[in-house]
Amino acid sequence: MAVVELEIPARPAYLSLVRLVVDAAVGSLAPGLGGARLDDLKLAVTEACSNAIEAHQSVWTDQPVIVRCQLDNDTVTVEVADHGGGFDPGEVTTLPAATDPSRLRHESGLGIPLMRTLSDDLAFVTRPDGTTVRLTVYRAKTT
Amino acid sequence: MQLRTDVSSLDGWTVVSVYGELDVASAPALRERLVDLVTQGYHHLVLDLEGLDFLDSTGLGAIISALKRARTNGGDLRLVCTQSRIRRLFEITALDKAFPLFSSLDDAVRA
């Protein structure tokens, strides 16, 4: 098993770096997971980090966001740990269908549904000092 | 990587070509650029996403915002997008049903 950990300031300018690190870690340590599945993982991790950065900004903390990639024979797991105020994923608004004209009223709220769609497993762990989002993809799965 | 936009015109449409990565870091600038154009009276917009390397939900939000603003003013916003990894985001959010996705600028302005 290999672990690659990155600590970033909670600022949007660092999202690009997170994608580069995930790309490099998966590309060199889990080379079977490429193409569309790696793109999906990078998008899901970006969504998790964006939420973490927003959470940090809402509580005015200057603590870093931790991105931890864990790669083993079967899975790639990326954890994004924040020190924000936490949230209840069950309370996330369900969006209207895309064909419903009211759907276009919603310019945000797509992040968590996207993470669910793009990963094989999504978990939220509430810690005393923040939230950890755990995204898992199975290496053997084919699209 | 920063986001870059070029604005041109084609058959009465204002074409905004977007290059780079569209995420939380860059979406506010694109949102502002598109709002400025609609405010200036450019209500028929084509957003050319062929030079886009990355798109996330915040970027989608900026595009939705511009679409609504254009339609409120009697115009429209059409997207040019052939890259599968960018189209995929529209497809899995089912927003490809709300946005016309075209495979070329010519198709977008002549539809």
Image: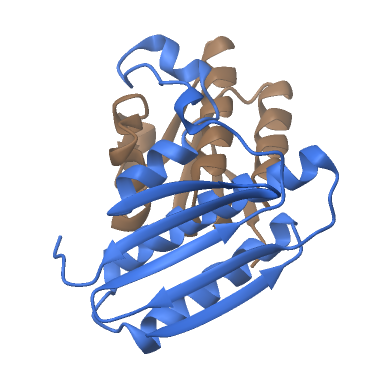
Q: Colour of chain A?
A: blue
Instruction: Note the chain letter of the brown one.
Output: B
| Residue with the most extreme bottom position | A28
- The quadrant of the picture occupied by the C terminus of chain B is top left
Residue A98, position in %: x, y? 33, 22
> Would you say A72 lies left or right of A134 here?
left
Residue A34, position in %: x, y? 29, 74
In-front residue for pair A67/B64: A67
Residue drawn at x 45%, y 56% is A134
Residue A112 falls in which quadrant of the image? top left
Residue A65, position in %: x, y? 68, 61
Relative height, residue A3 to residue B25 (above, below):
below
Residue B85 falls in which quadrant of the image? bottom left
> Would you say A67 lies left or right of A37 here?
right
Residue drawn at x 39%, y 79% is A26
- The quadrant of the picture occupied by the N terminus of chain B is bottom right
Residue drawn at x 49%, y 33% is A89
